[in-house]
Amino acid sequence: MNTFTLKFFARLREETKTDALEIPLGEVASLGELKEYLQKQYPHWSGFLSGKLLSAVNQQMVNDDVPLQAGDEVALFPPVTGG
Amino acid sequence: MIHISVQTEDFNVQDEYDAVCQQNNDDGAVVFFVGRVRDLNQGDAVFSMTLEHYPGMTESALADIISEAQQRWPLNRVRVVHRVGPLQPSDQIVFVATSSPHREAAFAGAEFIMDYLKTRAPFWKKESTDKGERWVDAKDSDAKKADTW
């Protein structure tokens, strides 16, 4: 199956009660399509997804839209607060 | 030489400093920073906090930040230790040390690494306060500070 893994962290993980999802590439071909897909698929998450979120693809922070591939590890999380 | 550790255990500043200095005759300057848990945030008493991170990405994000610092300044040794898990007020959270032949690079490098760590390394703090539990919001001032480099 052509899927990628989506991981949530911190507040987003708690709000959605979800650690990780497998998403078909047929539904989401690039990072830019991800939020819209999630909002359509999980309408009750739209409030959680509306704030500022950062994205990573294969554990690298990504600011732009990038195409996704089978087996990619994508992550969405709130702005970081370490240190 | 760089060292990165993401750990639940506490760290000993003397041991970390000694590791930066051991068999190091090149560097006349060592700068280190320690970040600690405060018992007050945004006017509320903080009883404890938990630090979450993104295993794997955390270590690579820290390595990228250190590598960028080493491109900007001659930092022969960099050491970053960051704790995760439950922490109490006055606990140590983070240790950053840089060493260089001269102090300017060591000071600037340590500050740069902390500023970038605060905005690019995937750690998140959740506080337990007298008003309940809450995720700490990222500060605009931290983003602006990191943008100054």
Image (cartoon, rainbow, N blue to C red):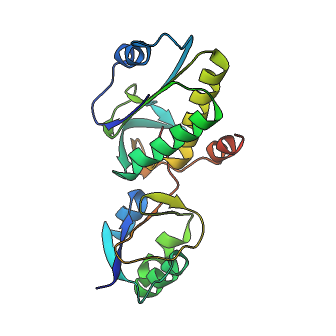
Percent position (x, y) of residue A8? Answer: 38, 64
Residue at image coords 56%, 26%: B75
Question: Quadrant location of the N terminus of chain B?
Answer: top left
Left or right relative to B20: residue B146: right
Question: Quadrant location of the C terminus of chain B?
Answer: top right
Eyeballing the image, is B16 above or below B120? above
Q: Is residue B129 visible?
A: yes
Percent position (x, y) of residue B65? Answer: 53, 42
Eyeballing the image, is B72 above or below B123? above
Frontmost residue, A39 versus B7: B7
Percent position (x, y) of residue B57? Answer: 40, 52
Quadrant in the rendering for residue B6: top left
Q: Is residue B132 visible?
A: no
Report the residue that reaches farthest toward the bottom: A26
Report the residue that reaches farthest toward the right: B148
Left or right relative to A44: residue A67: right
Instruction: Count up the numbered dots.
Output: 0
Residue at image coords 59%, 22%: B106
Frontmost residue, A16 versus B43: A16
Eyeballing the image, is A10 above or below B116? below
Residue at image coords 53%, 63%: A53
Percent position (x, y) of residue B56? Answer: 35, 51
